Image (cartoon, helix red, strand yellow):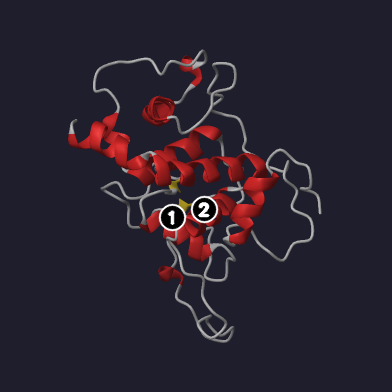
């Protein structure tokens, strides 16, 4: 009801048709911030990386679940976005943080008692989102090895871990800068997410083959 005439209406409706956004809500809230869990759902569903469980496949409420089966301490067995979060992790797109040792999930050595959290309710930032999309392409290794500038006015504000993604997203045309700024800490809205993923899908359809040939095979 609240997306009619919105600048992101077409992108929102497209992702909604894929069930990347919940289809049961009557109001969407396009200008509301999107959480890490919501982003995981939107991206993995849009890319076909996850199969939602059917009613028959869902675990009965009385069936006991071992806590060790969960990847993150703050994403329990009954978390509504667990399937999408774990799919994003298994595809190497999103990870958690060991909040006691500050070790990214997946790096070794990993403490046996590590408290790994995904922070599903935290709002996702532009830097995080672009890092995830570049990982989805498998192009993160294409960034220059030597010291380089990203080309953005706010280059120095871009976190070290996001610099490769910022540089590559600009080179590949994955994102439109805002008057020359990357705005790494800008919190994404649902509308931002819809446009970003919609443009990413368009890139996969139209430009990926050329970039793979020119930038990867000839690298």
Q: Is residue 34 visible?
A: no
- The answer to whether 170 appears left or right of 76 in the picture is left
Labelled disc at residue 135 = none
Residue 5 percent location from the top left of the image: 78, 42
Of the pair 5 and 147, the residue shown nearer to us: 5
Which quarter of the figure has residue 134? Answer: top left
First in residue order: circle 2 vs circle 1:
2
Question: Residue 99 in the image: x percent, y percent?
Answer: 46, 45
**Can you identify the residue that label 2 sits on?**
40
Q: Secondary structure at mark 1?
A: helix
In the image, residue 61 above or below residue 134? below
Judging from the image, what secondary structure is the residue with disc 2 in?
helix
The crowd level at tag 1 (other Cα within 10 Å; few <14, some 14-19, many 20+) is many
Q: Split into 4 quadrants, where in the image is the N terminus?
A: bottom right
Query: Residue sitting at 79 percent across and 55 percent down?
Result: 27
Identify whether 114 is placed above or below 217. Answer: below
């Amino acid at each position: 009801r609240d997306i009619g005439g919105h600048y992101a209406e077409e992108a929102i409706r497209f992702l909604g048709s894929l069930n990347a956004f919940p289809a049961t809500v009557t109001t969407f809230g396009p200008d509301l911030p999107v959480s890490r869990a919501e982003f995981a759902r939107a991206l993995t569903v849009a890319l076909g990386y996850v199969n939602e469980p059917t009613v028959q496949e869902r675990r009965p409420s009385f069936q006991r679940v071992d806590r060790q089966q969960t990847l993150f301490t703050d994403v329990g067995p009954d978390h509504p976005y667990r399937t999408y979060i774990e799919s994003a992790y298994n595809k190497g797109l999103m990870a958690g943080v060991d909040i006691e040792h500050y070790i990214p999930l997946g790096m070794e050595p990993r403490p046996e008692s590590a408290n790994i959290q995904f922070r599903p309710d935290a709002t996702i930032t532009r830097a995080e989102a672009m890092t995830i999309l570049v990982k989805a392409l498998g192009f993160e290794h294409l960034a220059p090895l030597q010291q380089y500038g990203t080309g953005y006015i706010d280059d120095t504000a871009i976190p070290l871990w996001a610099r490769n993604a910022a540089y590559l997203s600009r080179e590949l045309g994955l994102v439109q800068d805002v008057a020359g700024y990357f705005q790494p800490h800008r919190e994404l809205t649902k509308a931002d997410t819809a446009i970003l993923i919609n443009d990413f899908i368009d890139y996969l359809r139209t430009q990926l083959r050329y970039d793979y040939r020119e930038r990867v095979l000839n690298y």
